[in-house]
């Protein structure tokens, strides 16, 4: 069965700079978010897209339509986790409480279809999971003075990407619990870990960058051209 995908796109993109939030800045001739939407809409196992935009958004209306898949919008909140929760609440009734839902950052335009398929197959056999990759670099602990004071073990440490995939109600409950406790969770998996679920780590391509800094736009343009 095909899944809905929630796309948090309500951030301000402070670290990326520019005259508008990063998801609306131009990459390879089009707003960044158009690349993300196009890739997701093209995936045969994605049924529809729920884009979560800021209440102050003035750019989404001019984003090109995706064809062939339903696209809905919801209004996001001050933290990414609030935006995701708003998106989950706004999903259509055709998405059952126990159905799996994907969550994918609008700011990750280089996501690969084969990675999405593997996530759905592997994490869907259990209680959900996420794309990520094991750390490659040596990991240092910085002391107060900015000097390295220790080398941390790299084994068993992963970077978390999106999409992340969990059951609609279980994820909504976990995100609401974290929010009620005043804890800002940086991803869906963190919310699930807090309620005792161990999300499956599915290794994905490192091409799946989150555009975060000004230099990332050029990198995304290169990676989009390479993986199209
Ligand atoms: N996001 C969101 N709602 C928020 C904050 C972030 O929907 N309140 C979205 C962003 O639009 C982005 C994704 O979550 O697609 C990942 O967040 P991040 O990379 O941190 O984006 P921003 O918060 O926009 O960037 P910054 O932290 O640099 O301001
Ligand atoms: Mg942010």
Image (cartoon, helix red, strand yellow):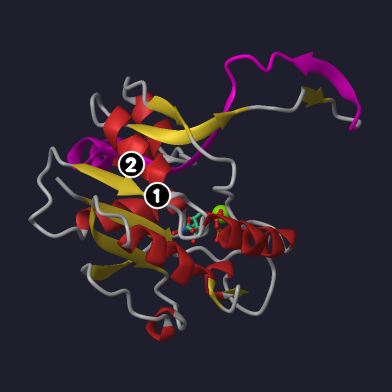
Q: Which residue is mark 1?
A: 113
Specify few, some or many for label 1: CA neighbours under 10 Å numbering under 14, 14-19, or 20 or more. some
| Disc 1 residue: CB within 8 Å of ligand 1 | no
Specify few, some or many for label 2: CA neighbours under 10 Å numbering under 14, 14-19, or 20 or more. some
Residue 215 x, y percent position in the rendering: 74, 60
Residue 126 x, y percent position in the rendering: 24, 24
For the point 36% across and 64% down, which residue is it?
52
Q: Is residue 135 magenta?
A: no
Q: Quadrant of residue 53?
A: bottom left
Residue extent of the magenta highlight: 146-174
Q: Quadrant of ligand 2?
A: bottom right
Secondary structure of residue under mark 2? helix
Q: Which mark is residue 117?
A: 2
* Camera-side residue of 133 and 79: 133
Discs 1, 2 touching: Cβ within 8 Å: yes
Query: What distance separates the C-alpha of mark 1 from that of mark 2?
Result: 6 Å
């Amino acid at each position: 069965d095909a899944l809905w995908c929630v796309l948090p796109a309500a951030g301000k993109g402070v670290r990326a700079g520019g005259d508008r939030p990063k998801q609306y800045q131009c990459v390879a001739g089009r707003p960044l978010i158009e690349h993300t939407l196009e890739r997701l809409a093209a995936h045969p196992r994605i049924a529809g897209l729920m884009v979560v935009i800021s209440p102050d958004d003035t750019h989404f209306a001019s984003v090109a339509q995706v064809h062939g898949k339903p696209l809905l919008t919801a209004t996001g909140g001050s933290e990414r986790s609030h935006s995701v929760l708003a998106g989950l609440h706004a999903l259509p009734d055709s998405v059952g409480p126990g159905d799996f839902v994907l969550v994918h950052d609008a700011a990750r335009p280089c996501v690969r279809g084969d990675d999405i398929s593997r996530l759905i197959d592997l994490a869907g056999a259990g209680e959900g999971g996420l794309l990520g990759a094991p750390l490659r670099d040596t990991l240092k602990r910085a002391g107060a003075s900015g000097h390295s004071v220790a080398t941390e073990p790299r084994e068993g440490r992963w970077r978390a990407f999106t999409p992340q995939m969990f059951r609609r109600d279980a994820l909504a409950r976990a995100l609401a619990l974290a929010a009620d406790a005043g804890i800002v969770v940086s991803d869906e998996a963190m919310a699930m870990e807090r309620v005792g679920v161990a999300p499956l780590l599915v290794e994905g391509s490192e091409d799946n960058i989150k555009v975060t800094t000004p230099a990332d736009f050029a990198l995304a343009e290169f990676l989009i051209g390479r993986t199209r």
